Image: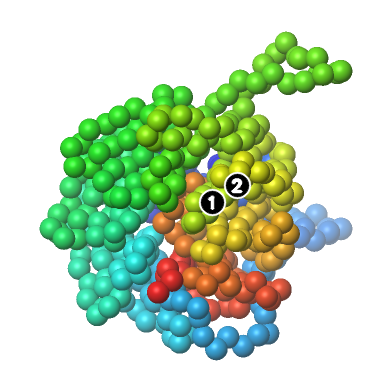
Amino acid sequence: MAAALLLLAACTRANEVVFEGGATTTLAAGTKALSASTAGTAAAPSSSPLPSTSSAATTVVAAPPATIPTSGQVLESLPGTIAVTGSSNESMLLLGPNLEFETIDDVPGGFFAQPTWSPDGQFLAWARESVDGVTEVVVRSTVDGTQSAYAVPYITFYMQWRPDSRAIGLLGGGGAGTALVVLDLDDETVSPLHAAGSFYFDWSPDGTSMITHLDSSRLEFFDLDSGDVTLVDSETGIFQAAVWTPNGDAIIYTRPSTIQTAGIGGALVAQAVTVEELVLHHVATGEIEILAHATGIGQFSLAPDGARVAFTAIGQGEESVMRVIDLATGQTEAIEAGFVFALQWSPDSNKIMLMGIDGPDIVYHVWDSGEVTSYIKATPTEIFLRYIRFWGQYDLSMRLWAPDSSAFVFTAEDGDDDSVFLQRLDDDLPIKLGPGSVATFSPAG
């Protein structure tokens, strides 16, 4: 597997993000790796050996933690509300448009994770674990501020709201598998429904079913009411979550394909090449439309309006070529964007945030109308690094873009602290908002 998907972060807790059964690989405490060339290896610590002519041991002086350069612009208000897990992960915070932080939940010695906004913006949910091991999902009304806690049978590491904002699909577990539970707000039930060795999903637009990618090998429709399972494809590519088009007519995913490559003079090479093909699977007819081929691991993201899909291939040590494909016309635009391993469309469906890698850092770019603008390079927080390893799933529920598509939020190591930053598209440098390990914008409205 390409190294960009083998991002490792130090973890001293038992509730590390896990999608594929059992505990994920960890490094020694205080180390991390984010490298395109070396998988599973901690980045070398920054140090400077001082030469000495004596027989004494060489002295090594560690470089001070880097601070992130910030903009001199004065921010008067935010274009939306940002949910933030505190830098110690022992609290849940809201940063409102008025730029004031509000602590909405805290448990000394506890742990908070994955704040997730409902599609209509009227609820915010998050997972928490108390110091004595009690695991819950908390749902807060943004209308009146009331909060309800629901006991769940395991540590929740992923949640996605049903499109009608009345239920949440939860993934968690460990050991031999990953389990799906649905929290229904109307009848206040927490119902275990499905499990597999590895489990990724997306709600259907009407909320009656899910498209599930199980055990990295099969794609299925799962009916929530009946529990019926229908096989969609038994040969899936190297991806995480398949996605529905907004009208519910089709799903998008990758699958392996064998092609012949052209040799000298156009002659076909005898040896076939296995590639990933991005496909549009029409639900009603079963027709499969091939959108693109790629060598390496495919990453894709569908625009909110469903008109275009962005697709990039990750190859070991290779630069990726991003393609923006119009689903109606099939027209493809190739974008040279360097090594990109994660991407997210803006709410207005006109721009794409691209996350690349440079040593231990994430490099943020934005594609807009065929042009790529490069912004900040920063070392991600340990918690966000756990999410980014599975961005093919978290892209469906974690909003980094501001509701008006004018900016995006990110968290990074800043000196000795974890901090939240706002990157406005009309500014070269970000604005520091305050402490925090993970941050996500509310939807429009």
| Relative height, residue 231 to residue 48 (above, below) | above
Q: Which residue is mark 2?
A: 326
Front residue of 47/246: it is 246
Give the residue at x 69% y 53%. Answer: 358
Residue 307 tag number: 1
User: Residue, x 40% and y 74% (percent of image)?
Assistant: 445
Q: Residues within 10 Å of mark 1 (few under 14, many from 20)?
A: some
Residue at the limit of the structure toward the left, as seen here: 187
Answer yes or no: is residue 2 visible: no
Question: Answer yes or no: do the residues labelled 2 and 1 have beta carbons within 8 Å?
Answer: yes
- Tell me how far mark 2 sits from mark 1, CA to CA: 6 Å
Amino acid type at image mark 1: Ala
Q: Nearer the viewer, residue 85 or 53?
A: 85
Q: What residue lies at 63% left-to-right and 32% top-to-bottom?
A: 293
| Quadrant placement of the N terminus | top right
Find residue 197 and report its horizontal and vertical position in percent.
35, 33
Q: Is residue 14 left or right of residue 387?
A: left
Task: Give percent across and percent down for residue 101.
Answer: 42, 82
What secondary structure is found at the residue carrying circle 2?
A: strand
Residue 43 lies, with reference to residue 252, above or below; the image says below
Relative to residue 39, is residue 233 drawn left or right?
Answer: left
Mark 1 or mark 2, which is nearer the start of the sequence?
1
